[in-house]
Image (tube, helix red, strand yellow):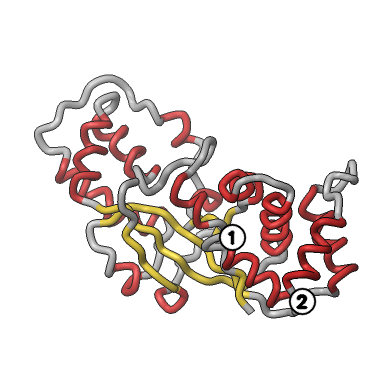
Amino acid sequence: MILDCSNYESTKKSVLDIFSTTEDKLASALQSINPYESSYKCAEDVLYDAACDILGHPKDNISVVWFHGTRTEDESLFNKLGILTKSEARKFIEPRLKELSEGMKNFGSNPFSISISGKQGDHDEGPFAFLIRDIAIHAPSPNHNYLDSPEIVEDIAGTLLGENYSQLVNSFKGISVPCLVSFTSESKGYEVPKALLYLKLVEDGETHFEAASSANTFFDSENIIVSPDRIKSVEIIENV
C-alpha cells in the first residue's frame, strides 16, 4: 500500500486504497468532520481519528513516496549512490565548488555563519524530503527552494567567498540542473493524517496549492543514506 502525494488525484487514490473505501464515502466523511473542534489536538489528528471511526482503520504496511529537491550535474548518480547525507554529499560538492571558485574574489564575512553554527550534528544530516510534490517544486515561504539552490551549496559558497557567495552559487547553477528525486519509505504514522488534511482543505474550497502548503510535512532520514533501491524516479524540473 502506497501513499503518493504527487498531485491531488494520486493523493485521493492512495487514501481510497489505504482505507479500502469509495470516493463517495470519503467525500461524505470529509464533509462531516470539523478538524478544528479540539483545543488540544492538531487538525490532522482530529481528522484522522474521526475518519477511522467512520471508514475503519487503514491497512498496515503503508509505504510513502517522498520528494527530495536538489541540483546536480549528473542525475544518474542517484541511481548509483542513492541520496547522500550532508557529510557524504559535501565530499563531492566542496571540491567542485573550490574548483569553480578559482579566480573569484572573497570579500566580507560569510552571511550564513550563524545559520551554519546551528546546523551541526546528526540532526542536520538528513537527507530531507517533502510529502507533497508541489511544495517540493515551488517551495512557498518559509520553505527553502532546493531546486534553485541547495543550502549546502550556499553555505560552502559563503565560507569560500564571504559576501560574494552569489557569484559562486550562480556558477554552480550554470553547470547543474534542478532535479526532483522521489523515493519510498515505510510510514511512520503521521503522513496519512496530513494527506487527509490536504484532501479536506480542497473539499472545503482551498486551491490545491493552498491546501498543499498547509498540509505538507517532511521526511528526515536521520543521517542514513537513502539507498538506490528505494529511488522511485529522478526527474529534471524545467523552468524553476
Looking at the image, which residue sits at the far top?
A: 108
Q: Could you say which is closer to the camera, residue 5 or residue 92?
A: 5
Q: Quadrant of the N terminus?
A: bottom right
User: Is 184 drawn above or below residue 147 in the view shown?
Assistant: below
Q: Secondary structure at mark 1?
A: helix
Q: Is residue 90 visible?
A: no
Looking at the image, which residue sits at the far front?
A: 24
Q: Secondary structure at mark 2?
A: loop
Pointer 1 residue: 8
Pointer 2 residue: 21
User: Is 66 drawn above or below residue 176 in the view shown?
Assistant: below
Where is residue 76 drawn, in percent x and y? 27, 69
Drawn side of residue 119 relative to residue 89, left or right: right
Where is residue 114 drawn, in percent x and y? 46, 29
Drawn side of residue 25 relative to residue 225, left or right: right
Q: Quadrant location of residue 102?
A: top left
**Residue visible at 24% across and 26% down in the picture:** 164
**Residue visible at 80% across and 70% down in the picture:** 25
Local packing at callout 1 (Cα closer than 10 Å; few below 14, some 14-19, many 20+) is many
| CA distance for labels 2 and 1 | 17 Å
The kind of residue tagged 1 is Tyr
The kind of residue tagged 2 is Thr
**Residue visible at 67% across and 51% down in the picture:** 202
Q: Quadrant location of residue 84?
A: bottom left
